[in-house]
Image: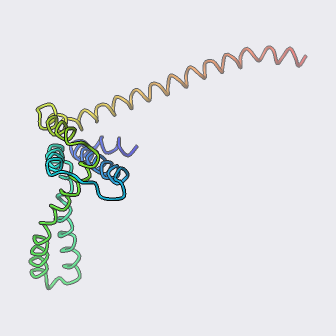
Amino acid sequence: MPKLDVIRNGVDGEMIFTKRVRVIALTAAMALSVLSAPGAAQEISAEHLRAARTAIDAINATDEFDAILPQAAQGLKGELIQQHPHMEELINKTVDEKAIELASRRADLEREAALAYARVFTQEELEQIAAFYNSEAGKKLLSSGPAVTREVFQAAEIWRRGVVRDLSSNVLDTVQQAVAADKPAAQESSQ
């Protein structure tokens, strides 16, 4: 059970689980937007798009993508420095400069995410989503949800083991009783 393994990893697992939930939600919204959009692009009002941006900000839908560019830059630095150790200073400087130039493209992701949500949810629904996740209860759900989910998975695992144990025990009892009752009948027919 990969999800259970992630959740058992404690705080890091909680962050990973939260990120997975958000990625799944964003991916589902984007997939639905593609499936629900007619052949031509759907016209979305500026107000609707603003509501979508507010909603994705409230649920932190794209936060997990913040690390992509820094991780790519770090990986590229490591690779290039390994190949050309004598050029470490130039590599670090150049990668940092080029990464900073690309940082503005983060807005492209925000726009696409907002469009995906706007295609799936009405402006009113997006406003309701934002209102909930900006409320104390919504903020608590985002911050405490992974811990609660971990506890639910632990309870479900204990429950699963008990159900499997009891099912097996009950079935074995019934089968053993039937086998025991069948022995005298089998002995009488063989005589």
* Render colour scheme: rainbow
Position of the N terminus, as image quadrant, is top left
Residue 182, x across and y down, in percent: 76, 17
Residue 29, x across and y down, in percent: 30, 48
Residue 136, x across and y down, in percent: 11, 32
Image quarter for residue 161? top left
Give the vertical position of 42 relative to 91 (above or below).
Answer: above
Q: Residue furthest right?
A: 191
**Residue depicted at x 87% and y 17%:** 189
Residue 6, x across and y down, in percent: 31, 45
Left or right for 48, reference 189? left
Between 63 and 177, the one lying in front of the other is: 63
Give the vertical position of 23 relative to 39 (above or below).
Answer: above
Position of the C terminus, as image quadrant, is top right
**Residue depicted at x 12% and y 37%:** 134
Image quarter for residue 91? bottom left
Between 22 and 83, the one lying in front of the other is: 22
Left or right for 109, reference 172? left
